[in-house]
Image (cartoon, rainbow, N blue to C red):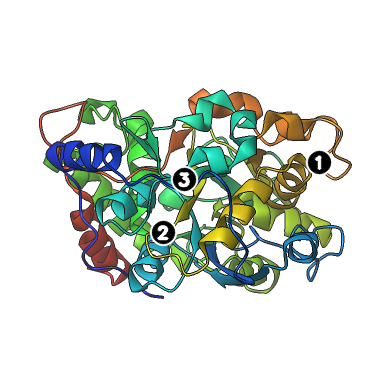
């Protein structure tokens, strides 16, 4: 997996400068020109389907036929990998989570979006239309795509009742089947997972005073790293490839892990004894934005995809496939794959309860100074290495 070593926290002054620069951005054409025949997209697994996994889930081939823009997808397993790919260049778009979007803006790897060229912009959920992970001083650097919660996936034969705490993957304990969890649990292979540990300690060590899992003082940060070093002793694998995690739950005896609804859905479709839950401590989550590379080689096809990405049918089908929530509320109604209560089931009403991924910075609202993201990167690599 590619890691980006230069990803680091961005100061407030940098954001102010960026916002000022965005306000001076050159005027863009208000109409989309002739397509270039191709659009290259960096995407999370399962986000862009052409019916190869299941013919019911296909939002690519119709777009290609209608626009003559062929879609090529490069899958990224972590936000750091996505940032690294966008830094390398050659791509038009990326479906970026909140822990990477501001880094791409600060690094000038993405350009402002001319929303007049995305007619469906006003159909976006108002909670997301000007979200701070893609909007600076009123300038939008992306088009919202999907959002949702990280979940605790578990084997129902081991857990007859849903686990109520993330403790089953953070600390060594005896599971309901009478066996230890050591070697039977997993954790996410990405520095942003430090926030999951912080969220757990917010409930279990309140004396630390953590109020925001992305804003950690040195003492709070040390406590989280200690927790994760302890977790290292019981984790069988740190996952970032969804399909490897699916195989581990099927064939390697893994019974509990942080996960995405995407893997839960696939395993359930295969008839496996799998379910998911959000434990009492709550959960982190993702609100993903499709961002346009500053040097996009196929900008017209890219804008056509941005408009297509907000189609209610695509939004509903994707939500059904991935277990996520559409950014277009109209997609929640009348979608055969998502079902009548699909949006509610996937967490539409939980928006305020989710601690959405974002890039930690040295200056923070909850306290005077916080540990910036570049430290999260180097220290989490050390944790994975057993140090």
Q: Position of residue 242 (x, y in %)?
A: 59, 65
Q: Is residue 364 visible?
A: yes
Q: Tell me: residue 261, above or below residue 64.
A: above
Q: Specify the quadrant that holds the N terminus.
A: bottom left
Disc 1 secondary structure class = loop
Marker disc for residue 70: none
Quadrant housing residue 58: bottom right
- Give the spatial CA distance, label 2 vs label 3: 16 Å
- Residue mark closest to the camera, 3 vs 1: 3
Q: Which residue is mark 1?
A: 338
Mark 3 or mark 1: whose residue is earlier in sequence: 3
Quadrant housing residue 151: top right
CB-based contact (under 8 Å), mark 2 and mark 1? no
Q: Tell me: residue 337, above or below residue 23.
A: below
Horizontal side of residue 248 vs 78, given as left or right? right
Q: Which residue is mark 2?
A: 79
Mark 2 or mark 3: whose residue is earlier in sequence: 2
Nearer to us in this view, 242 or 229? 242
Nearer to us in this view, 156 or 375? 375
């Amino acid at each position: 997996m590619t890691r980006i070593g230069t990803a680091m926290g961005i100061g407030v002054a940098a954001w102010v400068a960026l916002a000022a620069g965005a306000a001076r951005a050159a005027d863009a054409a208000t109409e989309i020109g002739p397509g270039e025949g191709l659009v290259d997209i960096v995407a999370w697994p399962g986000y862009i389907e052409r019916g190869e996994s299941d013919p019911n889930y296909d939002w690519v081939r119709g777009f290609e036929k209608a626009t003559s823009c062929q879609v090529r997808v490069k899958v990224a397993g972590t936000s750091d990998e996505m940032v690294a790919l966008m830094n390398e260049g050659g791509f038009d778009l990326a479906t970026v989570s909140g822990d990477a979007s501001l880094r791409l803006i600060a690094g000038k790897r993405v350009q402002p979006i001319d929303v007049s060229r995305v007619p469906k912009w006003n159909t976006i959920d108002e909670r997301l239309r000007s979200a701070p992970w893609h909007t600076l001083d009123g300038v939008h650097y992306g088009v919202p795509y999907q959002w949702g919660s990280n979940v605790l996936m578990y084997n129902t034969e081991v857990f007859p009742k849903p686990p109520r705490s993330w403790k089953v993957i953070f600390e060594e304990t005896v599971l309901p089947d009478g066996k230890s969890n050591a070697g039977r649990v997993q954790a996410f292979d990405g520095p942003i997972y430090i926030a999951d540990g912080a969220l757990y300690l917010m409930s279990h060590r309140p004396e630390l005073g953590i109020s925001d899992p992305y804003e950690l003082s040195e003492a709070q940060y040390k406590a989280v790293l200690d927790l994760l070093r302890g977790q290292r002793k019981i984790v069988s694998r740190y996952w970032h490839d969804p399909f490897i995690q699916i195989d581990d739950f099927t064939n390697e005896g893994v019974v509990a892990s942080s996960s995405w609804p995407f893997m839960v859905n696939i395993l359930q479709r295969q008839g496996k004894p799998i379910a998911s839950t959000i434990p009492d401590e709550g959960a982190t989550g993702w609100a993903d934005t499709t961002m346009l590379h500053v040097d996009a080689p196929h900008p017209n096809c890219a804008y056509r995809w941005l408009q297509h990405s907000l189609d209610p049918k695509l939004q509903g089908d994707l939500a059904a496939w991935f277990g996520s929530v559409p950014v277009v509320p109209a997609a929640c109604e009348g979608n055969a794959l998502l079902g009548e209560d699909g949006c509610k089931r996937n967490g539409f009403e939980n928006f305020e309860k989710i601690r959405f991924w974002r890039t930690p910075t040295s200056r923070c609202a909850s306290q005077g100074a916080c540990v910036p993201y570049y430290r999260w990167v180097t220290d989490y690599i050390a944790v994975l290495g057993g140090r």
